[in-house]
Image (cartoon, helix red, strand yellow):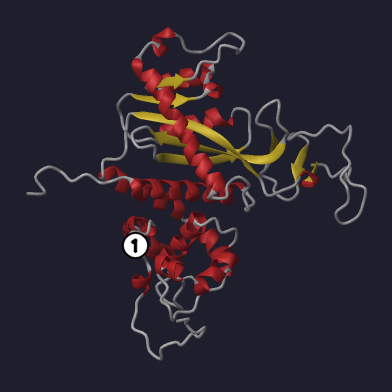
Amino acid sequence: MRGSDIMQESLFMVSKLEDFVPEDHPLRPIRLLVNEALGRMNSLFDTIYADSGRDSIAPEKLLRALLLQIFHSIRSERMLMEQMRYNLLFRWFVGIAMEDNIWNHSVFSKNRDRLLEHEVIETFFAEILALADRRGLLSNEHFSVDGTLIQAWASHKSFRPKDGSGGGTDGGRNAQANWKGQPRCNDTHASQTDPDARLYRKSHNTAAILSYQGHIVMENRNGLVVSALTTRADGTGERQAALAMLDGVKGKGRKTVGADKAYDTADFVAACRERNVVPHVAQNDSRPGGSAIDGRTTRHEGYGISQTIRKRIEEHFGWGKTVGRIRQTVYRGLRRVDQHFKLTMLASNVVRIARIPVGVPQGVLQ
């Protein structure tokens, strides 16, 4: 018998948000991990908010919402809060009851400076790594390093002379740009939309774009990001950022670092050895003068292992650009782009950690 096309709602319903989320949903282990890390940040949250006054939106909820935006590739905070209104899964993950009103999307903009000032994202990143370390997921000896290009939220039309000469357009609000025959470089020009962005091209066969550079250091045991940094796009930025991040890596023993051919320079290799780090960089024999490393490094079995594992670092960049929206940032200014990049790498770590089964020590189970 055909059913009737009628929806009849009950007058009362006794149900919790927890009941609507499947037991095997991938966000369940992620939420447990995130909540454990946020719980260890209570002392920091207490210092950045006043003791009296009107209650703010809980910072834990803001951070969970920002992670949810990355997980589901939501392009704006406005759309995130629109979905939060009717998506029960989103409400459950963030911690908003069914009968609670959602906050305005401008709350994110007003709190972003507070998160920057008190380095909340950096602390969150460190707490996630601390949880991974307690589970025995991190290596303190073997690492990989690489960088990627992040397109800035600025167009070529905004890249104009610093002295204000030459508009570079034919007039009109959005007229066709005309800079034919005009030399343009970072020394004489700057973007009026995002002054921190730099004109840069990844190779001789690609176009120059206004961009930033994102850098990460990955440990080689489970492929987790242990350090992330955003810099202005520069020809030597990758190597300088790699050294700065290696200085902050924990552990006093000897380390190894795998990298691609861009890091095969005499200055980088020498700087690594000064830090007691063995540079397992890919050899660039086509470089004038040849490779900076020789058989004394490449003959060891560990060199081949580092070169194999270092390619896994591209998984974080690929996930961040397809899911996390860092292919082209929607933020302006180095600090805000850096915050977004670190939060995306944090989200990539959380997804990876939640999928790694935690071993039970011997003697716990009888």
Q: Residue visible at 51% across and 13% down?
A: 292
Q: Residue visible at 46% across and 35% down?
A: 313
Q: Position of residue 80 (x, y in %)?
A: 55, 65
| Vertical relation: 194 (above or below) 287 | below
Query: Residue at label 1?
Result: 42
Tell whether 360 sits left or right of 241. Answer: left
Q: Extreme right residue here? A: 170
- Position of the N terminus, as image quadrant, is bottom left
- Amino acid tagged 1: Asn
Q: Extreme bottom residue here? A: 11
| Vertical relation: 289 (above or below) 82 | above
Q: Where is residue 185 in the image (x, y as percent from the top left)?
A: 76, 33
Q: Position of residue 272 (x, y in %)?
A: 44, 22
Circle 1 Cα neighbour tier, 10 Å, few/some/many (<14 / 14–19 / ≥20): few
Residue 37 visible? The answer is yes
Residue 117 visible? The answer is no
Quarter location, residue 297: top left
| Vertical relation: 258 (above or below) 361 | above
SS for dot 1: helix
Q: Extreme left residue here? A: 366
Quarter location, residue 9: bottom left
Tell whether 313 sits left or right of 195. Answer: left
